[in-house]
Image (tube, rainbow, N blue to C red):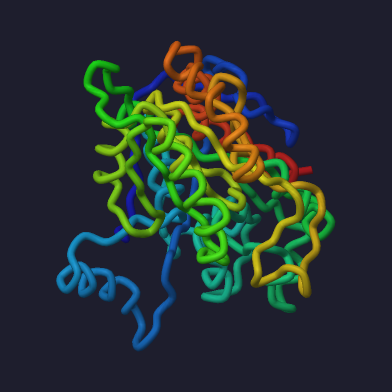
Amino acid sequence: MDVVERIRANPASLPHGGTAASLVPAGPVDGAERMTLNLFFEERDDRWFPGDRHVRPLLRRLLLGKSWISGQRRVFLNLCAGLDRVGIRYRVNDYGYIRKHPDELACIIGRPFVLDWFEWKNPLLLGVAMYNHPVDAPGHLKDLHARTILVPCDWYAEMCRPSWPLVEVWPVGIETDLWTPTPAAQKSVDVLLYDKVRWAHERHESGLIDPIRRHLEASGRSVEMIRYGHYKEDDYKAALARCRSMVFLCEHESQGIACQQALSSGVPVFAWDRGGPWQDPEYYPDRVRYEGGVSSVPYFDGRCGSKFIDAADFIAGWSDFWSHVSAGDFAPRDYVMDNLTLEKGALHYYDIAEAVVQRQAR
């Protein structure tokens, strides 16, 4: 990625400071001077020779066509887009600059191997695309407990806080001018069944996915299916434009950008939200037992739709959900506009970054 510094003309402002920032930052303060953020984002480490991380994606695109945009890259792209909109300057991957300015904050958004590339002297703001859990941090980085680390939602923060006391919650903003509602008259499909079941898929297919689909079809609803990791963003956007509602199936989400893109598109969601422990099989039950209660829709309220915990609960609650969809009672885009725009996400990120700087100066 080229080193860039983007500057947009905008009245200078500064959101409120402090580590207990709300989801929606306070309004701007006229006349405040904003610092330039130093952003670092890498998805890949070098594999065969120095710098090949830049070449491999180009070769992949030549061979396989346009690549899938990962969740980590989407976070980075949306953060930059939000910073552009609110006029906050930033540099990207300027390692030469940051080594010459050890007093400046380094915001490492991408994978943690960047921490091993040289000895960082700077104060650091880490995440949200770092480690899945503190147990993954290598021994020589145990001082992460003294770093500010970002995670996307409250339940994830509670899981990590015993090891990372300075953990902060930050959800990235959604491109609300791209993910927009389609007029109801242009809708042709009743339900988009979004399958993001990641573990024990065969078991969940027979116990959850198939019963839900059969019930929808028996109820006379037309259904379109899409599976996570097997579509391009344009395909998903077109599906949302066709569909009146979405059933979202995922064990848990730390933010749930795809679901929030649906909400921004004005599509009400009936979400599988089973709760319970964090059951990622890479960690549970042997390495990590977090019983605090996870969620597949950590950013969600009554405007967005409804939730169910299993197939039986879906069947019991479907008619009520659909009646509200038909009556136009839900307002999912309003929730996103109130909480999760690109601008709000960028201001919130800057708010946290400035709080880190102020804490280092004490």
Q: Give the residue drawn at x 56%, y 38%.
A: 271
Residue 33: in sight, yes or no? no
Query: Is 192 in front, or is 83?
Result: 192
Residue 24, percent across and down?
60, 24
Residue 160, percent across and down?
75, 55
> Left or right: 248 with respect to 25?
left
- In which quadrant of the rendered image does the C terminus lie? top right
> Left or right: 128 with respect to 287?
left
> Left or right: 156 with respect to 268?
right
Where residue 230 sits, quadrant-wise, is bottom left
Residue 147, percent across and down?
72, 56
Query: Is 137 in front, or is 158?
Result: 158
Q: Give the residue drawn at x 15%, y 70%.
A: 62
Q: Give the residue drawn at x 35%, y 30%.
A: 190
- In which quadrant of the rendered image does the N terminus lie? bottom left
Where residue 64 sits, quadrant-wise, is bottom left
Residue 168: in sight, yes or no? yes
Residue 237, percent across and down?
29, 38
Residue found at the far bottom of this picture: 48
Please say if 5 is above or below 109.
Answer: above
Q: How many marks?
A: 0
Q: Give the residue drawn at x 74%, y 70%.
A: 135
Residue found at the far right of this picture: 162
Please say if 7 is above or below 225.
Answer: above
Query: Is 145 in front, or is 154?
Result: 154
Please say if 104 is above or below 221.
Answer: below
Residue found at the far front of this picture: 218
